[in-house]
């Protein structure tokens, strides 16, 4: 599944950047995937050639196939161990994955029907990103990486082992968020693996540089991971031309099936939504994304789950207010940036705004208490207030989250480590 274009073959590139990842990436379908693709796009714009290597078939989870979306074409080559590639479709070779998928479908149907019993238990596969590396994983990297690697970028700290497998190359880790800061904040339901502070620092220290998605995490790196260079690279946005005030009685939440999204929506349904509906019975909430999996029985009256949506454009255009009721989680909340770029009025918690508080002053309605969150939503039923906040949101996206602003540090690091620049630097050192 590894291929190279004619441009790559004749060497018309500043260098090859290999991303090593064990997350399930089909396109911009969730925050972590969207961020990695954003960085790959930055590599392209900087004149380098990005490649994606995925050494573990465990990333397929319990679903036997996946369809790669057009945005995956940003990678010059893409290889996954243990799968078959048929056009844009990827099919796992292990038949046990198909059985897991069937069990999951039966379990979800049973839950919707209210059935119970141990035979209906749904057993998700382990979190592939943090699974221990196997010798087969290592052999795959050693075999596939050398021809497409001038610089190596490990996706999450758990992939630090890839750096050791490719010695002598400049290296970076995409941190995404601080795992140790999430411990104990989701009643044991967080979908990610646990790392304590010392473990996380040790993994991050293995790279020459660590890419942080927001300022407070870059500050943590500077203070506690001095062996690695911190690179601040927020998620970039592509702002639309005009603000979209939408319908004041229509709310929108967008998110994938992660513990922060599920827990945040549970809080909103229990504490906020009854207050909103009490004062505005016509108000509705559209929920887009795979977060619907966490609510097999649906939501309260007025809430509609749409599941995975290929094009969110019409949802953003119709919505009057985008809500982000997160109660825990680290990293830049990528859907916040997307909502700003869509010119939307946003109501968000402190957790959502973590790391971008300064950039969002006056551009986002901020509320943490349930009554305040509901009041902020109801206040934006006013057309003038909603338009003013949507206009401010779009201005913040243009000022703080343009590709040029977000990727400047990352692009500079790539330029410093392009192959001929690295050789020249080493020659000067020897001289």
Image (tube, rainbow, N blue to C red):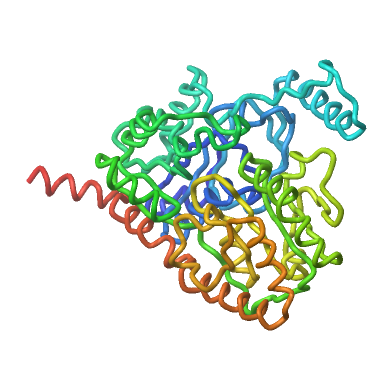
Picture coordinates of residue 374 (x, y %)? 69, 62
Would residue 180 be found to the left or right of residue 373 on screen? left
Front residue of this view, candidates 260 and 165: 260
Compare residues 121 and 92 and report the one nearer the observer: 121
Residue 396 at what x, y percent from top left?
Answer: 51, 72
Does 110 appear above or below 424? above
User: Closest to the observer: 355 or 164?
Assistant: 355
Q: Is residue 423 above or below residue 243?
A: above
Quadrant for residue 388, please give it: bottom right
Image coordinates of residue 195 in percent, x first then y, are 45, 29
On screen, 167 above or below 377? above
Residue that appears at 46% across and 62% down: 357
Asked where in the image residue 411 lies, by quadrant, the reply is bottom left
Q: Which residue is depicted at the point 69% across and 66% down?
A: 377
Q: Is residue 30 left or right of residue 44?
A: right
Judge whether 240 appears above or below 70 on screen.
Answer: below
């Amino acid at each position: 599944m590894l291929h190279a274009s004619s441009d790559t073959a004749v060497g018309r590139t500043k260098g090859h950047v290999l991303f090593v990842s064990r997350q399930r990436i089909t396109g911009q379908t969730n925050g972590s995937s969207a961020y990695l693709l954003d960085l790959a796009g930055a590599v392209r714009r900087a004149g380098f050639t990005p490649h994606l290597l995925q050494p573990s078939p465990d990333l397929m989870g319990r679903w036997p196939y996946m369809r790669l979306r057009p945005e995956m074409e940003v990678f010059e080559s893409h290889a996954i161990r243990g799968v078959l590639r048929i056009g844009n479709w990827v099919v796992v070779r292990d038949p046990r994955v198909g059985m897991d998928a069937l069990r999951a479908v039966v379990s979800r149907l049973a839950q919707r029907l209210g059935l119970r019993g141990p035979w209906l238990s749904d057993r998700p596969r382990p979190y592939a990103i943090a699974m221990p590396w196997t010798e087969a994983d290592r052999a795959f990297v050693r075999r596939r990486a050398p021809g497409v690697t001038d610089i190596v970028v490990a996706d999450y700290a758990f992939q630090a082992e890839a750096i050791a497998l490719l010695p002598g190359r400049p290296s970076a880790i995409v941190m995404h968020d601080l795992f140790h800061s999430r411990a104990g904040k989701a009643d044991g339901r967080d979908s990610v693996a646990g790392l304590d502070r010392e473990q996380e620092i040790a993994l991050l220290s293995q790279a020459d540089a660590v890419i942080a998605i927001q300022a407070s995490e870059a500050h943590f790196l500077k203070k506690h991971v001095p062996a690695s260079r911190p690179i601040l690279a927020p998620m970039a946005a592509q702002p639309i031309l005009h603000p979209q005030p939408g319908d004041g009685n229509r709310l929108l939440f967008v998110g994938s099936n992660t513990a922060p999204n599920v827990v945040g929506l549970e809080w909103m349904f229990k504490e906020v939504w009854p207050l909103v509906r009490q004062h505005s019975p016509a108000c509705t909430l559209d929920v887009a994304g795979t977060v619907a999996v966490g609510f097999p029985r649906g939501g309260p009256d007025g809430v509609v789950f749409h599941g995975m949506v290929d094009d969110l454009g019409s949802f953003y255009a119709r919505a009057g207010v985008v809500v982000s009721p997160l109660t825990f989680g680290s990293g830049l909340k990528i859907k916040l940036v997307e909502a700003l770029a869509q010119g939307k009025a946003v109501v968000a918690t402190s957790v959502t705004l973590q790391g971008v508080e300064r950039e969002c002053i006056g551009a986002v309605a901020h509320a943490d208490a349930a009554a305040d969150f509901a009041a902020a939503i109801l206040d934006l039923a006013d057309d003038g207030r909603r338009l003013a906040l949507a206009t401010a949101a779009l201005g913040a996206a243009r000022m703080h989250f343009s590709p040029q602003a977000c990727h400047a540090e990352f692009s500079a690091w790539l330029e410093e480590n392009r192959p001929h620049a690295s050789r020249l630097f080493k020659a000067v050192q020897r001289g």
